[in-house]
Image (cartoon, rainbow, N blue to C red):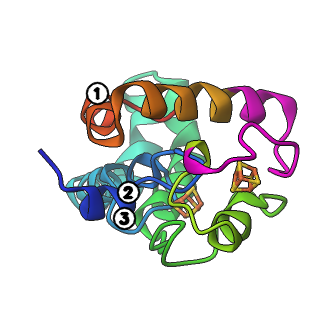
Amino acid sequence: MNSYSEILNKLGPCGLNCSKCFAFANGDIKELSSELKKSLGNFDIYAERFIELLNKPVFKKFPDFKVMLNHFATVKCKGCRNDECKLFSACKVKQCSKDHNVDFCFQCAEFPCNKHGFDEHLAKRWITIQNKMEDNGVEVYYNEIRDLPRY
Ligand code: SF4
Ligand code: SF4
């Protein structure tokens, strides 16, 4: 069981799980991408050969795949509470939660508000997450979702 303060390093005040974000420096997407990059070694040369040798045109896509893999393997975000978010430039929740002196929006008297800055899809997700945290507690919520993909 993670302590409340450990969980605060993983979940933003909106409740989204930074540790499962592709941009998180200590996340499993980065870690697994780095491992795969290492395991592939000099696969570029082989990918080119395999197009004809194995008659597999799919290997033509390896250079693009590698660009994506390199991206995932070099991300550096320290998470919402320790860094600037690289994804949601319109998000108002981070500053607003500080102004309201709450760790999560469900702890705020104004929740659910219209100050979040999210689009409709994200706003619905925000409300669902906050309600779950309020109903079951932050620790229970985190332990339910900690190993699930964010996407
Ligand atoms: S702060 Fe934003 S970019 Fe960084 S890990 Fe969290 S969701 Fe991803
Ligand atoms: S006003 Fe809205 S966005 Fe700001 S902390 Fe309260 S619930 Fe969250």
Give me the C-alpha separation between circle 3 and circle 2: 4 Å
Which residue, given by chain and number where applicable, does mark 3 sit on? 9
In the image, residue 36 lies at what x, y percent?
28, 51
Give me the C-alpha separation between circle 1 and circle 3: 16 Å
- Image quadrant containing the N terminus: top left
Q: Residue at x 17, y 51 (%)?
A: 2
Mark 2 / mark 1, whichever is N-terminal? 2
Relative placement, left or right, of 54 versus 110 is left
**Element under disc 1:** helix
Question: Does the numbered disc 3 mark a residue whose Cβ is under 8 Å from ligand 1?
Answer: no
Residues drawn in magenta: 107-124
**Badge 2: how crowded within 10 Å, few (<14), some, or many (20+)?**
many
Q: Which mark is residue 75?
A: none
Identified by mark 3, the residue type is Asn
- Could you say which is closer to the camera, residue 23 or residue 119? 119
**Element under disc 2:** loop
Q: Residue at x 55, y 78 (%)?
A: 83
Q: Relative to 3, does residue 78 appear above or below in the rendering?
A: below
Identified by mark 1, the residue type is Glu
Q: Is residue 93 visible?
A: yes
Q: Which mark is residue 144?
A: 1
In the image, residue 126 lies at what x, y percent?
65, 35
**Badge 3: how crowded within 10 Å, few (<14), some, or many (20+)?**
some
Assess whether mark 1 and mark 2 are in contact (beta carbons under 8 angstroms): no
- Could you say which is closer to the camera, residue 7 or residue 121? 7
Which residue, given by chain and number where applicable, does mark 2 sit on? 10
Q: Quadrant of residue 54?
A: top left
